[in-house]
Image (cartoon, helix red, strand yellow):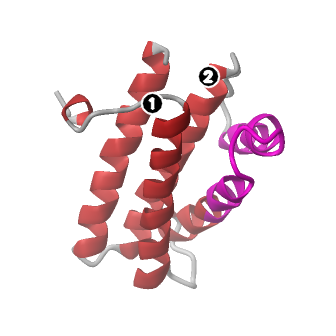
């Protein structure tokens, strides 16, 4: 695992913790957005391992699908998780007329946790102590 991958996975872990707090305090849209960012950071960590880096969210999502999920390095369902999370993040962050529900937020947080577990299996472990903010 590179230092950049570790930093990305630690940021993902912090984002999941924030998403859980937001969800439990009645902010499902913001919780879904933080869950998306956790998945986004994890996707970036996978791509970093391939020597790839992108500046746009859409490019990271597409590259994760092309270089990681569709090559069998990670299950394709994780690309679907990332796509769905991006859509919900748009709804949660930009005042969409159809707000994110608590159930949708719970699902996104669960997917973010699964994504982190996958990354820890395939990239390397991130201890809880490593992810604490400084």
Q: Percent position (x, y) of residue 11? A: 37, 36
Residue at 56 percent of width and 70 percent of height: 91
Q: Is residue 55 above or below residue 91?
A: above
Q: Which comes before the other along the chain, label 2 or label 1?
A: 1
85 on left or right of 21: right
Residue at 20 percent of width and 33 percent of height: 133
- Residue that badge 2 annotates: 48
Along the line of sight, which residue is nearer the eye, 84 or 50?
50
Residue 101 in sight from this viewpoint = no
Residue at 27 percent of width and 78 percent of height: 26
Q: Which span of residues is magenta-colored?
A: 57-84
Q: Is residue 79 above or below residue 56?
A: below
Along the line of sight, which residue is nearer the eye, 124 or 30?
124
Whether the residues at callouts 2 and 1 have beta carbons within 8 Å, the answer is: yes
Q: Percent position (x, y) of residue 67? A: 79, 34
Along the line of sight, which residue is nearer the eye, 5 or 93?
5
Q: Secondary structure at mark 1?
A: helix
Tell me the crowding category of disc 2: few under 14, some 14 to 19, or many 20 or more residues within 10 angstroms, Cα based: some
Q: Secondary structure at mark 2?
A: helix
Q: Count all numbered tags in the image, as a single digit.
A: 2
80 on left or right of 42: right
Q: Quadrant of residue 69?
A: top right
- Residue that badge 1 annotates: 8
**Cα separation between marks 2 and 1:** 10 Å
């Amino acid at each position: 695992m590179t230092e950049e991958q570790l930093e990305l996975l630690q940021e993902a872990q912090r984002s999941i913790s924030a998403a859980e707090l937001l969800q439990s305090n009645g902010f499902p849209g913001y919780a879904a957005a933080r869950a998306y960012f956790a998945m986004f950071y994890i996707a970036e960590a996978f791509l970093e391992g391939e020597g790839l880096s992108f500046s746009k969210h859409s490019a990271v999502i597409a590259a994760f699908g092309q270089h990681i999920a569709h090559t069998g390095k990670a299950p394709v369902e994780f690309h679907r998780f990332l796509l769905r999370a991006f859509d919900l993040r748009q709804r949660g962050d930009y005042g969409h007329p159809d707000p994110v529900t608590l159930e949708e937020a719970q699902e996104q947080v669960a997917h973010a946790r699964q994504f982190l577990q996958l990354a820890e299996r395939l990239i390397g472990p991130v201890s809880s102590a490593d992810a604490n903010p400084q």
